[in-house]
Image (cartoon, rainbow, N blue to C red):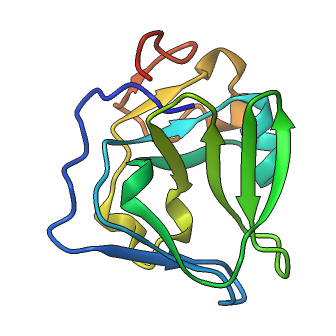
Amino acid sequence: MSGPTEGQAPSPARPLDGGCLCGRLRYRITAMTSAYWCHCTLCRKASGSAALPWVSVPREAFAVTAGEPARFASSPGVARSFCGTCGSPILFEKAGERDVDVTLGTLDTPDAVPPSHHIWTGSALKMSDGLGAGLTRHDEEVPGEI
């Protein structure tokens, strides 16, 4: 699902840590490629929200530092990882993509990584119209950005 790298998010000056609601699952990010809002139906259903902000991270720059995530195959070639205790969604992994996507809201300092654009706005809910106003909006995922 890695979104387009438009206005690429800089790599953090220091690692960014995050985790789930109950604290049993923790992770660390050491680099990132982009941050964006996703409006696809699958992300909405997985999160229970009108849209979900993600940060794309090279696979090798993401590490679980505590706990063991539960996994769910949400569609062919796609795994979503979450805390098996509290249910917080944490990670989206698509086979063949160089990046994984981390739920931005689970970072300890989510405002350190502001989204730069929206993807899958063709399936956006009306209630999310003003969300991230002024950011570029793409009806779908931009092809070739894997």
Percent from the top left, x then y, of residue 119? 53, 25
Q: Residue at x 48, y 16 (%)?
A: 138
Residue 30, position as x, y percentages in the image: 30, 65
Picture residue at 44% right of the left edge, 23% below the top = 146
Q: Nearer the viewer, residue 144 or 20?
A: 144
Nearest the viewer among 2 and 106 is: 2
In the image as oriented, which residue stretches furthest toward the bottom?
Answer: 23
Q: Nearer the viewer, residue 20 or 44?
A: 20
Labels in figure, total: 0
Say left or right for 84 vs 58: right
Find residue 15 and report its horizontal and vertical position in percent: 28, 73
State the image coordinates of residue 3 (x, y, percent, origin top left).
46, 29
Q: Is residue 82 left or right of residue 135?
A: right
- Residue situated in front as seen by the camera: 28 or 49: 28
- Residue at the spot x=31%, y=29% of the render? 5
Please identify the quarter of the rendering in which residue 31 is found: bottom left
**Vertical comparison of 83 with 119: above or below:** below
